[in-house]
Amino acid sequence: MKFEIYNDKDECAGYMLLEAYPEELHIVWINVHETERGKGFGSKLIELAKSYAKLKGLSRITGFVDTSAEGYIQRKRFFERFGKLTFSNRALSFIILP
């Protein structure tokens, strides 16, 4: 499924792709357009995912942080605000409780 968020000009500011499993909601991809970063749109997308998980009775939200590309530190800091980060098998993953 896909959640989108719009700015005050009714332009898509960002989106998130999700997959639902029996016990969790998995964030496959989250992106806020470069010109819209720092305005709270990423946080609003996470809040939408949390509300959806709670509505569906899912116990957690999971995902992976891309560690190889530019912007890794910013992505890591972003997800640290919402949940627990773990590093295993050369991958950084996160868990957010709704």
Image (cartoon, rainbow, N blue to C red):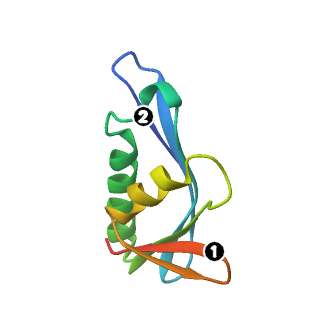
Residue position for label 1: 91
Circles 2 and 1 in contact, beta carbons < 8 Å: no
Q: Which mark is residue 9?
A: none
SS at mark 2? loop
Given the image, on which type of amino acid does mark 1 rest? Answer: Ala
Decide: is 23 above or below 31: below
Q: Residues within 10 Å of mark 2 (few under 14, many from 20)?
A: few
**Residue 60 percent coordinates (x, y):** 41, 77
Q: How crowded is mark 1: few (under 14 residues within 10 Å), some or many (20 or more)?
A: few
Q: Quadrant of residue 52?
A: bottom left
In the drawing, does residue 52 fall left or right of residue 14? Answer: left
Decide: is 23 above or below 68: below
Q: Quadrant of residue 42?
A: top left
| Residue sitting at x 33%, y 64% | 82
Decide: is 22 above or below 18: below
In the drawing, does residue 55 fall left or right of residue 95? Answer: left
Quadrant where the N terminus sits is bottom right
Given the image, on which type of amino acid does mark 2 rest? Answer: Arg
30 vs 34, nearest the viewer: 34
In the drawing, does residue 27 fall left or right of residue 49? Answer: right
Residue position for label 2: 37
54 vs 45, nearest the viewer: 45
Mark 2 vs mark 1: which is more N-terminal? 2
